[in-house]
Amino acid sequence: MNDVKLAVLGGEGTGKSALTVRFLTKRFIGEYASNFELTYGKYYSGELVKESIYNKHLYLEGKQLNLEIYDPCSQKAKCSLASELHWADGFVIVYDISDRSSFASAKALIYRIREPPTSHCKRAVESAVLLVGNKQDLCHVREVGWEEGQKLALDNRCQFCELSAAEQSLEVEMMFIRIIKDILTNFKLKEKRRSSGSKSMAKLINNVFGKRRKSV
């Protein structure tokens, strides 16, 4: 079984947890409230939860997957991304289309993810990232245009969509499937590069030692 690790990040009140719960249970829990994510961080499906990593088994593209979703439920969750960058295979970055400041936070997160890697933290393949404009049901008080989200995503090599966790269960599911497929594509690219690198090294060794044997 393949492990897929996905981090759902964004500013407070953007609906990160609502999206995650929608995908995991097909339910929408609660109204948009400032303390909603903190509440969800303590309770999940009516049970006390000590961690904010949730598991779901999927069968996708002929493979059985163990999906781990990291949702920083605490309002004091840090945004340095040091541990997340090391842990996650992909990222869902969420902003609220009715809150301009949440879009700025999403932009900062994407810039951090797309920073050139340091020598001790290089990735074989660029991380899969999906930018999500949530709360489309609040378009009558929209502060961030669809075009702005699309441009931010294009400029930073990300996927993009707008939806409503409150009203669009199927769209939320397809959004998660979309980023998971991107991650699986990255897995294939990594494997291909590893295989190519191994063959190149084997050829180099064979050339070196082959020449030595001939000269002896």
Image (cartoon, rainbow, N blue to C red):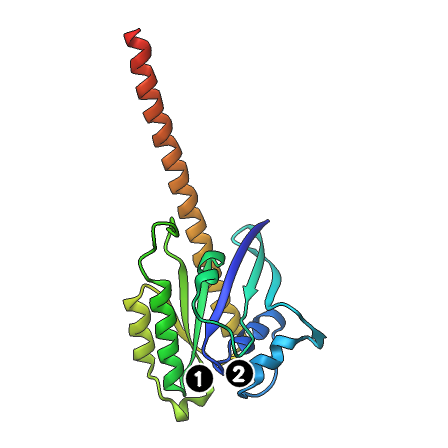
Badge 2: residue crowd in 10 Å (few <14, some 14–19, many ≥20): some
SS for dot 2: loop
Q: Disc 1 vs disc 2: Cβ atoms closer than 8 Å? A: yes
Q: Quadrant of the C terminus?
A: top left
User: In the rendered image of this protein, does residue 104 appear above or below residue 130?
Assistant: below
Q: Answer with left or right where residue 115 lies relative to residue 184.
A: left
Q: Is residue 35 above or below residue 190?
A: below
Residue in the picture at 29% in, 73% down: 151
Q: Give percent across and percent down for residue 119.
A: 34, 50
Residue at image mark 1? 136
Most extreme residue toward the top is: 216
Tell me what residue is drawn at x 27 percent, y 68 percent: 155
Q: Earlier in the sequence, mark 1 or mark 2?
A: 1
Query: Circle 1 — which element?
Result: helix
Question: Does any portion of residue 28 appear in the rendered image?
Answer: no
Look at mark 2 in the image and give the residue it sits on.
167
As drawn, the residue found furthest toward the bottom would be 140
| Residue type at numbered disc 2 | Glu
- Which of the pair 33/138 is nearer the observer? 33
Looking at numbered disc 1 in the image, what kind of residue is underneath it?
Answer: Gln
Q: For the residue carrying disc 1, how many other residues have a C-alpha within 10 Å: few (<14), some (14-19), or many (20+)?
A: many
